[in-house]
Every structure is written in C-alpha cells, then in structure tokens.
Image: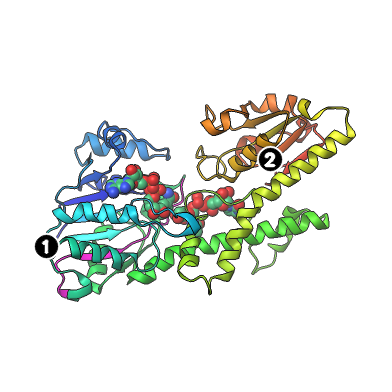
Amino acid sequence: MSFNVISVVGLGYIGLPTAAAFASRQTQVIGVDVNQHAVDTINRGAIHIVEPDLDQVVRQAVEQGYLRAATRPQTADAFLIAVPTPFREQHQPDLAYVQSAALSIAPVLKKGDLVILESTSPVGTTEQMAAWLAEARPDLRFPQAAGEQADINIAYCPERVLPGRIMVELFQNDRVIGGMTPRCSARASELYRIFLEGECVTTNSRTAEMCKLTENSFRDVNIAFANELSVICAEQGINVWELIALSNRHPRVNILQPGPGVGGHCIAVDPWFIVAQNPQQARLIRTARVVNDDKPLWVVDRVKAAVADCLSTTDKRASELVIACFGLAFKPDIDDLRESPAVLVTRLIADWHGGSTLAVEPNVQSLPAFLADNVTLASLEQALDTADVLVMLVDHRQFKAIPAAEITQQWLVDTKGVWR
Ligand SMILES: NC(=O)c1ccc[n+]([C@@H]2O[C@H](COP(=O)([O-])OP(=O)(O)OC[C@H]3O[C@@H](n4cnc5c(N)ncnc54)[C@H](O)[C@@H]3O)[C@@H](O)[C@H]2O)c1
Ligand SMILES: CC(=O)N[C@@H]1[C@@H](OP(=O)(O)OP(=O)(O)OC[C@H]2O[C@@H](n3ccc(=O)[nH]c3=O)[C@H](O)[C@@H]2O)O[C@H](CO)[C@@H](O)[C@@H]1O
C-alpha cells in the first residue's frame, strides 16, 4: 500500500526539512504545527528557521502544491512526530509535547496508518506513545496488544542530521528504523525510501531510542575529554591544541577539540535522558555532562585572572577596561545563539565586569534582549582597536582570518586555539 498523504507534526528544524524532503518527491504532505506564525510563513512558501538550502525546497514544494501547513492534524496515511523533547528540573525528560502531539493525531487515525516518532526520546517513549494512542482510540488495535495484526503500525526513527548540513544529511545519512514489530519496521522503511538515499537499518523501538542517545552521548564524552585536557594543560603550561594534534598522529587516537563548553539543543540535553533512567550506571555519561557544563565557568575565571593581571600591570581602572568577546553562536559559522556557552560566558563577564563588554558576532544583526543591557555588539575592527582583553569563544571563519599582526593585545583568553 503506498502513502498518498504524509503528515509531519512539528515543523521546526527537523519536521520542516523532513516535510519538504517528502514533498520534493511529489508526495502530498500536510505539515502540522501549533505555531500559527510558522504555519502562515510556510503556506507563503517561506521558512521561519535558518538552514542552508531549505528555503528553495520549501518554496518549490508549496508552489507546486505538494506541501501545505495547518494548525490541526488531518487524515493522512503516515504521521511523523518531530516535536521538542526538552528536560525539566533535575534534568528529567519532558514528554508533554510528544503526548500532546500523539493525542492530537489520535482522532484522525484510521486502520492501516503508520505513526513514527522522530523526537529524541528516552527509552520506552514509543511504547508509551502507543499506550496513549491505544487509550484514545479503543476501536483500533495497536502493536503492543495485537503484534503483527495491529491496525496501526508504530516505529521510532531518530533523526541524526547536523544543523547547517540538514538538507544534505537528511537524504544521505543511513536511518535507524525501530519498529514495534517487524511489520512496523518494514512499513517505516518503505516510507523513508520515498526520499532516502542512505540505507534503512532496522531494529526494535527501544534499541533505536537508545541508539540516538548513544550517538550524542559518545560525542559529549569525547568533547568532555578534550575539555578536561584543556584544563589540565593550562595548569601544566602546555598548549592543548598542539598536544591534541600530536596525539592524533597515533593511528588509533582521534581526540575532539576543546572549547568554551557544549551548546546546541541536542548534545547538552540528550545524555541526561540516559542518566535520568540509569542514575546508578551512567557514571561516565553524567561526569561528561558536568565537565562540559563547568567549562564556561572555568573560562570566566580565566578572564577574571587576565583582567586582574591587566589591572596590576597598567594604570587603568577597572571601569576603563574593555573586554571583547569573539563569538556568541553555539558553534562556528551559524547564527544560532540558543543554548550557547559563548552567550553564557559573555553574560557572566558582563554581569561581573565594571567596564564595558563588547561582543563580536558577524552572524547576527542585534543582541538578544537579555544581553543588550550591558553588552555592546561591536565590529571586529572596533573590538581589536579598543579592547584590552580579548576572549575567543567561537572559531568563526572571520576570526580565523584575522592576521596575527593585527592582534596587539597582551591579554588573550583563547578557548578555541585560534590565536595559538
Ligand atoms: N535540531 C536538531 O538538530 C535535531 C537533530 C536531531 C534530533 N532532534 C530532535 O528532534 C525533535 C524536534 O527538534 P527541533 O529542533 O525540530 O525542534 P523545534 O523547536 O525547532 O521544532 C519543534 C516544532 O514543534 C512544534 N510543536 C510543539 N508541540 C506541538 C504539537 N503538539 N503539535 C504540533 N506541533 C508542535 C513547535 O511549535 C515547533 O515548531 C527534538 O526531540 C530534538 O531533540 C533535533
Ligand atoms: C553525534 C553527533 O554528531 N550529533 C550531532 C549534534 O549536532 P550539533 O550541531 O549539536 O553538534 P556539534 O557540531 O558536535 O556541536 C555541539 C557542541 O559541541 C561543541 N564542540 C563540538 C565538537 C568539538 O570537537 N568540540 C566542541 O566543543 C560545539 O561547539 C557545540 O557547542 O546533535 C544533533 C542533534 O541530535 C545530531 O543530529 C547531530 O548529528
């Protein structure tokens, strides 16, 4: 049975590219989002998020009539849920969005439909989602009770695209397909084959859930290793970037890069889902989170030490001293400031510092309100001309291109090895 209409619920960084990918293969797609602004923007053929090459695919899909958005779910043959899965206090996963999305599609489900959860989720969430659906629709048979005879097929299929490369990786990455039964996996594989150039690799839903959390925890642990090395090297007077480059010459060593901490919406969040469910066992994963979360505070201490040194060797007063922070985004060459350790470091410096704090961020036009009070957005030239202490937080290409001769400041705190 083919899929005549596909519905994607949640049209953010994951849902909108996915909806556009199906639509780009001449399949009818109904995107659903509770955000009226997002729905209106998409229906105009425009996009409300920043991601390279997404705009043209969405524009074409809407113009050709393959993609339209709505605030309420409608009948479809397959539903993909891509809503947020943040954590609440104590790093406990918050499944309220998944529950609300599942309950919103329950009334329009019909026999033969496929429901896929794509949101990054703790182990067991797909079974929980199936239970919510079964409770809402006692007239239909679901896989947990009916197995292969179920009326509704349910699978967990995590997304692993890298922001900034979504429109490449969405098509090319292999996809893990975690069906609640083998038939659910087969049906989900059939769906993704509409646009997928990578392979569909099938497993069960719990393994697929754990697989997504494992991938991001792996990266978090490896970044924590690099961040810990950077702190040790600072104590020992060793250049950590040279050390890592040398160690990586070993055929079986591949250390990642230290930085001001770990940001973004995934790597700093997802490992906590494993810790929340396995507090006794997940010792390394928890420690990596703590190491990475502590790194911005360590950077601020380094800035305070540089300022103290500057004040003791010049006749400047603290109120006259200018600190320039280079970069606010959560990683290089993007404009996304959310969950960014660079923003945290800049905010903590500005809150503490009596003089002026500049931020140089070539990818944004204005500062978020919570920074605008005591931080000034400056050009690169202005910062290099006026600042006493320079803090490198994000290795944007514009910063890597600054000729060494243009940096005359004596007090540098470089978290990315750009000024090494
Ligand atoms: N952004 C990434 O790089 C990335 C990568 C892999 C996995 N993920 C995971 O994918 C999921 C979605 O992430 P995202 O970055 O797309 O989030 P997002 O915040 O960009 O988008 C989520 C969208 O869902 C909408 N929404 C919320 N509740 C809804 C509901 N009940 N019905 C319909 N729409 C609803 C929101 O309005 C929003 O537009 C998360 O679990 C995330 O962890 C994200
Ligand atoms: C396993 C994996 O690759 N997952 C990816 C990740 O995407 P992301 O954009 O969040 O990932 P990163 O680019 O790693 O950045 C995260 C933070 O780590 C800092 N960092 C990075 C490398 C380094 O050597 N040193 C560092 O300090 C960087 O500056 C930034 O703050 O999660 C997505 C959602 O689940 C996945 O879909 C996507 O595949």
Looking at mark 2, is its residue's CB closer than 8 Å to ligand 2? Answer: no
Q: Image check: 140 left or right of 63?
A: left
Q: Quadrant of the N terminus?
A: bottom left
Q: Secondary structure at mark 2?
A: strand
- Residue that label 1 marks: 111
Q: At label 2, which amino acid type do we have?
A: Met
Q: Name the amino acid, label 1.
A: Lys
Residue 307 at what x, y percent from top left? 79, 37
The residue that appears at 27% across and 45% down in the rendered structure is 24
Q: Is residue 267 above or below residue 280?
A: above
Which residue is found at the position 27% from the left and 68% from the top?
Answer: 185
Residue at which label 2 appears: 392
Q: Earlier in the sequence, mark 1 or mark 2?
A: 1
Which segment is the magenta one? 148-163
From this view, report whether residue 208 is shown above or below residue 19: below
Magenta stretch containing residue 309, yes or no? no
Q: Is any atom of residue 259 visible in this view?
A: no
Between 298 and 264, the residue placed more toward the observer is 298
Label 2 crowd (10 A; few <14 / some 14-19 / many >=20): many
